[in-house]
Amino acid sequence: MYLKPNSPAAASAGKSIIGFNIIHGREVEGDLSMIESRSAVDRRDLVGVFPDSGEKDVARAAKAAAEAFAAWSATPAPVRGAVIQRTGQILTEQKERLARIITREIGKTPREALGEVQEAIDTCTYFASEGRRLYGQTVPSELPGKALTTYRRPVGVCGILAANNFPLAVPSWKIIPAILCGNTVVWKPSDDAPAIAYLFVRALMDAGLPPGVVNTVNGRGRAGCGKHFLAGIDKGYYQKFSFTGSTAVGRLIGEACGRNLIIPSLELGGKNPMVVMPDADLDLAVAGALWAAFGTAGQRCTSLANLIIHEACAAEFKQKFMAGVEAMAIGNPMTDPEVTYGPMINARFAEGFREHWEMGQKDGATLLSGGEQWTQANRDGRVKGPIEHGLYMQPCVWDGVARDMWLFQNEVFGPTVNLTTVKDFDEALACANGTPYGLSSSIYTENRQWIERFKREIKAGMASINNSTTGAEAHMPFGGNGWSGNGTRESGMWVLDWYTRWQAVNDDASGRLQLAQIETDYGHPKTKRTDWASL
């Protein structure tokens, strides 16, 4: 790892990292030019410089992963777990430094950045112990002298592509269980956050991960390295592919994997609902809604999108919610770490967010707040710190949003939320299930019947009761249904099924050929049966 001084205007942010691809345990340059990682907080801050990789770089990384697979898959699982445990220890020791890099690169507040590093630490802690619990089963046979067993086997080389909004936590959800199960990895980090990815792989190497087990190729997205990375599916580079990102790209990956009979893990977009019923603790619901809608500037797949409010409490809730929006501190997380949210991660997200203003107006929704980018000219007391070198958006709140509106149906990445008023629980549930997505959901109520119905009838893969739509724990399954995913899950013991395949073993010690079903003795009665008809 090499460092160089930052520009004088951004010297206080920290030094710039000169980074590399990591292939077969070596730091290597790419075939193409270099890409810059510029801070979302202040574009003058050069966080790092990394290779812009091409087709040959992807091929080299895939070859390294394939070559490393035999030795790594033969390494005892508890030993693999020990490497992961040491990785978690390194992340713990460097937590503050890593969190600062996340804040610099993508603009998360320090509080959220520290939480993201902790999520990666929790993932290491959980899966380190799974190295001693990759259980199989002993199954009774229907024939004598015969033992039936099952055990997990690694799949092979895993291609991993994750979004930029959780550049450490989400890749750790994929990479850690993949290598714990004995697989090897080719990872293309987000070009918005290559520095934190580079440091994560350095931590794995420092923990003793053998060369070639995790390989990285940096570069641009679909027009650059990303195109070659995805082409590797059809070239046979991977036996498993895991993706977190948009539904549109997820469909393309699903098609390619289908052609090659690979089961992909797809964690895609969301249009997440929160229902507020009249018996709810409204102050608690407001706090949950503000956090879910505006945390990470709304740039989470689990961010609150459709806030569905019962008419009996709608007026009071809206008054409290809008007061919370007006009191929310927004701005530069490097200079003012207590802000609720910071900038948009990149210009593409900002442009998509601007476009939704026009769509909302076409729909006929009422804009209660927002509709502009913060500038030096229009900033008010809510805005903290320098913002002129980043993309900082006003919090958007739309009222009167109906189910058939574009706003209600389409995912918008950014600090925005829709308010929809309903008459009863049935209408609330219909609205909550009223989009093609099904990732996360939430309800605020104390009514046990409503809670039980919500848990049973909501189509989302995750449901929160009296909590926000965002938040994940390392030992719980994470994932969605419909346009939000293909039913696979991240995290917890459930993810192991997607990074292993079951091996069935039929061990016959009888000394003769035994034919199941054909010569099985199921204990048919050999004596005269009771004459039940005579009773």
Image: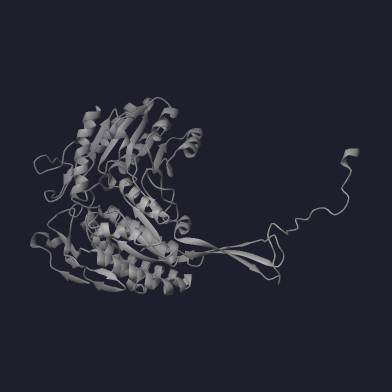
Residue 362 image offset from top left, x and y in percent: 22, 29
Looking at this view, is 520 or 491 the one in front?
Answer: 520
Looking at this view, is 491 or 473 the one in front?
Answer: 491
> Image quarter for residue 122?
bottom left
Relative height, residue 113 to residue 314 (above, below): below
> Image quarter for residue 307?
top left
Apparent side of residue 272 relative to residue 50 in the rendered image (left or right): right
Question: What residue sits 28% from the left and 65% below the top?
Answer: 58
Please indicate, yes or no, whether residue 284 appears anywhere in the rendered image. Answer: no
Apparent side of residue 249 relative to residue 72 in the rendered image (left or right): left
Looking at this view, is 518 or 157 the one in front?
Answer: 518
Furthest residue toward right? 534
Number of on-image labels: 0
Question: What residue sits 34% from the left and 74% below the top?
Answer: 211
> Image quarter for residue 160?
bottom left
Residue 208 image offset from top left, x and y in percent: 36, 74
Question: What residue sits 43% from the left and 66% below the top?
Answer: 180
Name the quadrant of the N terminus. Answer: bottom left
Looking at this view, is 498 or 119 the one in front?
Answer: 498
Name the quadrant of the C terminus. Answer: top right
Residue 364 image offset from top left, x and y in percent: 24, 27
Apparent side of residue 227 relative to residue 535 in the rendered image (left or right): left
Residue 113 image offset from top left, x and y in percent: 28, 56
Please indicate, yes or no, whether residue 307 appears anywhere in the rendered image. Answer: yes
Q: How is the image coloured?
A: one colour
